Image (cartoon, rainbow, N blue to C red):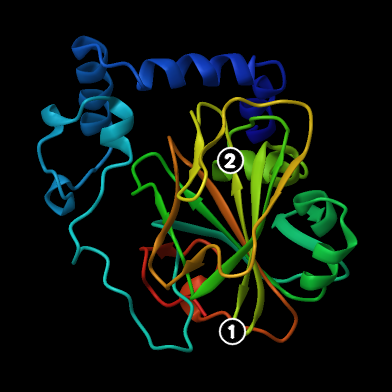
Amino acid sequence: MEKLKTAYQYILPQHGLTRLVGKLAASKNKLIKRSFINFFLKQFDINMAEAANEDPESYATFNDFFTRALKTDARPLAGDEETIVSPVDGVVSQSGKIINGDIFQAKGHRFTLSELIGNETEFNDRYQDGEFATLYLSPKDYHRIHMPVNAELKTMTYIPGRLFSVNPATARTIPRLFARNERVVVHFETQNGPMAMVLVGATIVGSIETIWSGVVTPPTGPVVKTWHYTKSQHIFKKGDEMGRFLLGSTVVLLFGKDQISWSDSCSADSPLRMGEVIA
């Protein structure tokens, strides 16, 4: 039955629909903006008391409301220098070991590391037999993405793809979901070794942004693009903002072999808040 409920996505004009919604969400028309914001406030349990700006009417666009900043004390960082924290609010879809280059998606579904991040041997070697965690952000969640650990930016790659929904039902029914969708793969170096953050696009996710480059997508295209960064050009501390989604999506974290150990809070279906210890 679940497969029937998600099958329509194969014929949906994914990119066209997403760009249309993106334009509406960026509109400064008061009627459009107010309609989008009021819908979300009624549809989802959004706690405006923790927002830096608590007044929904004062946001210029729905996008501004959706990616709203939180108060400085809303997401304290837990743990110590050795711990890794959640980069987002959301739910753990899956976590565990990368076994023989395979990453577990859901029961009956796996995808390969090389499919997810590209076929460059250098990057694949970094995470072979390492660890992964897939974190799902629903539309109600806080949508800024933060650094889980102190790190230096090395490269960023845009990989074109589909825009299937990334909700749990779709993850259970569409094979290789996260390796098929449009995504931005960001590689970092940490004191304990390599780390990648894969920002996965989805249906009506209007854009993926990073702090150092602004909007990465849209526009989209059929070509893989990679940006390289010089040593010490972009250094981040744990908790620093690194990017944001417009509407719900997924972050896949990757670490090298024998680099980390996931905590109990990072097991499948566990809810997370940004700043909580996950490893």
Could you tell me which quadrant the N terminus lies in?
top right
**What kind of residue is marked 1?**
Gln
Residue occupied by mark 1:
191
Point 55% across, 48% down: residue = 250
Q: Position of residue 272 (x, y in %)?
A: 40, 64
Q: Circle 2: is it few (<14), some (14-19), or many (20+) Cα within 10 Å? A: many
Q: Is residue 226 left or right of residue 144?
A: right
Pick the front one: 31 or 100: 31
Q: Quadrant of residue 42?
A: top left
Instruction: Tell me if residue 44 comes above or below residue 256 in the rendering.
Output: above
Q: Circle 1: is it few (<14), some (14-19), or many (20+) Cα within 10 Å? A: few
Pick the front one: 238 or 86: 238
Secondary structure state at the residue bearing disc 1 = loop
Counting residues from the start of the chain, the first of labels 1 and 2 encountered is 2
**What kind of residue is marked 2?**
Val
Q: Is residue 108 visible?
A: no
